[in-house]
Amino acid sequence: MFIGRLAGLTGCTPKAIRLYEQMGLIPEPDRQGRYRVYTSHHLTLVRLIRRAQVAGFKLAEMVPLIAAKNTLQAFPVEMANEAIDLKRQQTFEKIADLLALADHLGELKSEINSLFAPGAVITPHRDASSAGLDR
């Protein structure tokens, strides 16, 4: 298949596919004259790259996997699993941070409503100077 068909089947642009080739993420395809001819293997790889991107992986993070694959002549499953586990841990940490932020926002809303909502009793804030304690 030509690059346009591969792009259509994977939801990415021909420019992105050429970038994947340039970065070594997919093997350079055979050519028919000036045209690149992609196989089902390219289709599988591009779909995996796209899934990894959706999962939060940057293209640069995928390069070491491909380099290891080329060196080992086999896909480094253990290395990929470690990278995925690390990304999952980072995701859980982000979730915890977001939950803490959501709690903080709830507290801020409560404080603002208790201070400024209609019917709220507003007590003046007394600092050291207004209390005569700055002497």
Image (spheres, grey):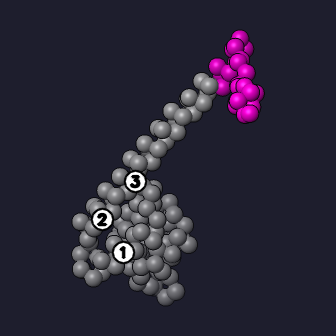
* Residue drawn at point x = 46 percent, y = 78 percent: 23
Looking at the image, is mark 3 or mark 2 earlier in the sequence?
2
11 vs 39, nearest the viewer: 11
Image position of 130 (left or right of 88): right
* Residue drawn at point x = 31 percent, y = 56 percent: 85
Q: Secondary structure at mark 1?
A: helix
The region drawn magenta spans 112-135
Q: x, y (%) of residue 110? A: 60, 24
Residues at marks 1 and 2, CA–CA distance in whole angstroms: 10 Å
Going by the numbered disc 3, the residue's amino acid type is: Gln
Most extreme residue toward the top is: 119
Going by the numbered disc 2, the residue's amino acid type is: Ala
Looking at the image, is mark 1 or mark 2 earlier in the sequence?
1
Q: x, y (%) of residue 73? A: 24, 80
* Residue drawn at point x = 33 percent, y = 72 percent: 65
Q: x, y (%) of residue 55? A: 42, 55
* Residue drawn at point x = 45 percent, y = 48 percent: 94
Q: x, y (%) of residue 115? A: 68, 21
The magenta stretch spans residue 76: no
Residue that badge 3 annotates: 90
How many residues crowd mark 2 within 10 Å: few (<14), some (14–19), many (20+)?
some
Up/down of 78 relative to 37, above or below: above
Of tags 3 and 1, the one toward the viewer is 3
Q: Is label 3 in contact with label 1 (beta carbons under 8 Å)?
A: no
Please, what is the dominant secondary structure of the magenta stretch?
loop
How many residues crowd mark 3 within 10 Å: few (<14), some (14–19), many (20+)?
few
Residues at marks 3 and 2, CA–CA distance in whole angstroms: 15 Å
Up/down of 49 relative to 115, above or below: below
Screen quadrant of the C terminus: top right
Q: Using the rendered view, name the quadrant where residue 78 is placed.
A: bottom left
Residue that badge 2 annotates: 80
